[in-house]
C-alpha cells in the first residue's frame, strides 16, 4: 500500500524535468545543421575506412614478403647470412626503397581516395 502512495507522489526532480521540457531552449541550431553533421560523420568514416584498408594492404604485403623469403630460404637453400649482409651493407638503399613503397601505397590507398571523396562532397553541396 505504501509503495502505491509513493508512486502517486511527484518528486522534485519530476517537476524540474517537466518544467525544463516545457521551456524553449536558449539556443537555436542552424538550418543546415543536419547536413553539416552528416558531412563530418561521412568524412570521419571515410578517413577511418581508408586507414584501415591501408593497414590491411600493408599487412598482406608484409606477409607475402615473409612467405617468399621463407620459401627462398627453405626450398632453394639460400643462406640467410648472405641476405643479412646484403641488407646491412646497403641499409640506406633498402630503407629508401621501403619508405618510397610505403609512401606510394599510403598515397594511393588513403590520400588520393580521401581527396577525391572530399571533392565529390564539395561538388554535391554546391
Image (cartoon, rainbow, N blue to C red):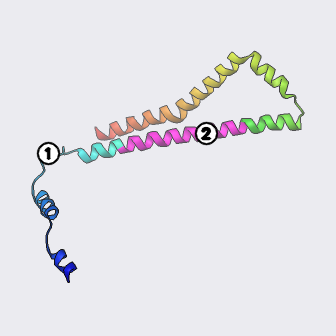
> Is 46 on the left-hand or right-hand side of 54?
left
Q: Give the residue displayed 87% in from the left and 30% down from the top.
A: 78
Q: Mark number for residue 57?
A: 2
Q: Is residue 119 above or below residue 6?
A: above
> Is 65 on the left-hand or right-hand side of 14?
right
Residue 62 included in the magenta stretch of the image: yes
Q: In which image quadrant can residue 37 be found?
A: top left
> Residue 95: image x %, image y %?
66, 21
Dot 1: element = loop
- Residue that label 1 marks: 27
- Of discs 1 and 2, which sits in the foreground? 1
> Residue 41: image x %, image y %?
36, 44
- Give neighbour class at mark 1: few <14, some 14-19, many 20+ (Cα, 10 Å): few
Q: CA distance from mark 1 to mark 2?
A: 46 Å
Q: Which of the two residues, 65 or 112, is positioned nearer the viewer here?
A: 65
Q: Give the residue displayed 80% in from the left and 37% down from the top.
A: 70
Amino acid at each position: 500500500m505504501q509503495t502505491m502512495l509513493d508512486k502517486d507522489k511527484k518528486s522534485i526532480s519530476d517537476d524540474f524535468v517537466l518544467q525544463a521540457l516545457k521551456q524553449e531552449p536558449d539556443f537555436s541550431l542552424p538550418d543546415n545543421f543536419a547536413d553539416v553533421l552528416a558531412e563530418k560523420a561521412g568524412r570521419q568514416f571515410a578517413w577511418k575506412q581508408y586507414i584501415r584498408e591501408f593497414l590491411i594492404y600493408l599487412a598482406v604485403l608484409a606477409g607475402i614478403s615473409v612467405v617468399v623469403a621463407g620459401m627462398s630460404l627453405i626450398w632453394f637453400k639460400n643462406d640467410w647470412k648472405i641476405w643479412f649482409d646484403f641488407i646491412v651493407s646497403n641499409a640506406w638503399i633498402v630503407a629508401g626503397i621501403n619508405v618510397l613503397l610505403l609512401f606510394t601505397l599510403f598515397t594511393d590507398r588513403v590520400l588520393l581516395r580521401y581527396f577525391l571523396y572530399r571533392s565529390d562532397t564539395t561538388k554535391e553541396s554546391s
